[in-house]
Amino acid sequence: MEYLVILLVIVIIYLLYLLNQKKNKPINTAIIVNKREEKTKRVIIDELEDQFFALNKFNIIKYANPSALKRFGSNLIDKNISSVIRNLLCYF
């Protein structure tokens, strides 16, 4: 009977350890991009004739290529994409 209690305590301690390890995972696991690659990607995006927007998870515009700035106006950064598109549709 004593062995069973000891075994049960060991199993509970092990499960608590596993639970604690799961909580301690790093929050930001994003891949770090090489600065050189990022610069070449930005050059490619800047040369596009199509409009390109980079949005955050809240649909806020964080980057617009020159073609997008020419079409939608120069004050796009930190605006919600839906307000930019909605304002454009009101003119037609």
Image (cartoon, grey):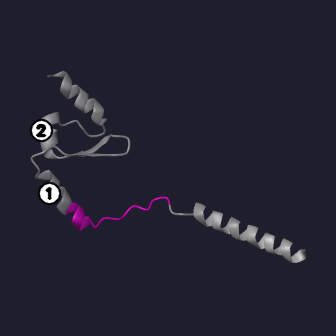
Is residue 87 positioned above or below 81 on the image? above
**Residue positioned 16% across, 22% down in the render:** 91
Residue 38 located within the stretch drawn in magenta? yes
Is residue 53 positioned above or below 79 on the image? below
Which quarter of the figure has residue 4? bottom right
**Residue positioned 35% across, 65% down in the render:** 32
Judged by its main secondary structure, the magenta piece is loop
Q: Which residue is mark 2?
A: 70
Horizontal relation, residue 92 to residue 33: left or right: left
Check disc 2 and give the amino acid type: Lys
Range drawn in magenta: 27-39
Q: Which corner quadrant holds the N terminus?
A: bottom right
Residue 43 located within the stretch drawn in magenta? no
**Residue positioned 16% across, 40% down in the render:** 69
Where's residue 68, x and y in %? 16, 41
Check disc 1 and give the amino acid type: Ile
Horizontal relation, residue 24 to residue 2: left or right: left
* CA separation in Å, label 2 and label 1: 17 Å
Q: Which residue is mark 1?
A: 44
Foreground label between 2 and 1: 1
Horizontal relation, residue 1 to residue 32: left or right: right
